[in-house]
Amino acid sequence: MRCRGPQYGALRVMPELPERLMPAPRILIIDDNEDDVLLAAAQVRRAVGDARFRRVDTAAAFSSALAEQPWDLVLCDHNMPSFDSAAALAIAKAAGMPSPFFVYSGEFSRGQAADAMANGAQGVLEKRDTSALVSLIARVAAATTP
């Protein structure tokens, strides 16, 4: 492919990067169940290829993860013994986190979903709805490519 400009003449445009060289989306998952995270990560990798995952399960670990690097997506379980999605949303807001925040839970009422959205969550996903998760990650991966 060539581009022309009066002051530059003919320029060669670099081809698009192969998929393997594109940055993998960075996904932070707040969940106390490591098995759930491993299952979600495996499903996502099968469907969209590479993605980087990190699991945290406390307010302190979440705050630390936000300070360490930017994240392309945050998924948060709602029901955890010592931490929940409402507390995580409050921390994300206080940190000025620009990443999309989705509640990802097995048990979540419509009222809780409405409250989460009112408090800044971009959406709610059921853990058993793997197709919605894969679709969300695919959109995030597409948005992170240059």
Image (cartoon, helix red, strand yellow):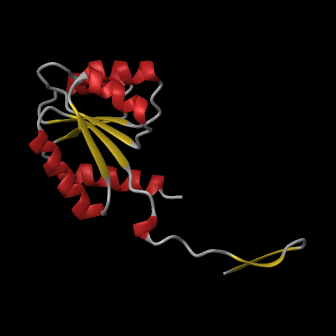
**Can you see residue 46?**
yes
Count of labels in the image = 0
Q: Nearer the viewer, residue 44 or 38?
A: 38
Q: Nearer the viewer, residue 135 or 28?
A: 28
Query: In the rendered image, which quarter is residue 23 located in?
Result: bottom left
Q: Is residue 22 above or below residue 63?
A: below
Residue at coordinates 14% horizontally, 25% vertically from top-left?
A: 80
Query: In the rendered image, which quarter is residue 94 located in?
Result: top left
Residue at coordinates 40% horizontally, 40% vertically from top-left?
A: 71
Q: Is residue 121 above or below residue 139?
A: above
Asked if residue 7 lies left or right of residue 98, the reply is: right
- Residue 20: percent from left, percent from top: 40, 68
Q: Is residue 112 above or below residue 36?
A: above
Query: In the rendered image, which quarter is residue 83 located in?
Result: top left
Residue at coordinates 45% horizontally, 29% vertically from top-left?
A: 97
**Can you see residue 119?**
no
Considering the image in quadrants, where does the C terminus appear? Answer: bottom right
- Among all residues in the image, which is located at the extreme right? 7
Asked if residue 23 lies left or right of residue 52, the reply is: right
Residue at coordinates 18% horizontally, 51% vertically from top-left?
A: 130
Considering the image in quadrants, where does the N terminus appear? Answer: bottom right
- Residue 22: percent from left, percent from top: 45, 62
- Residue 48: percent from left, percent from top: 30, 62
- Residue 78: percent from left, percent from top: 19, 27
Asked if residue 78 lies left or right of residue 138, the reply is: left
Asked if residue 117 lies left or right of residue 44, the reply is: right
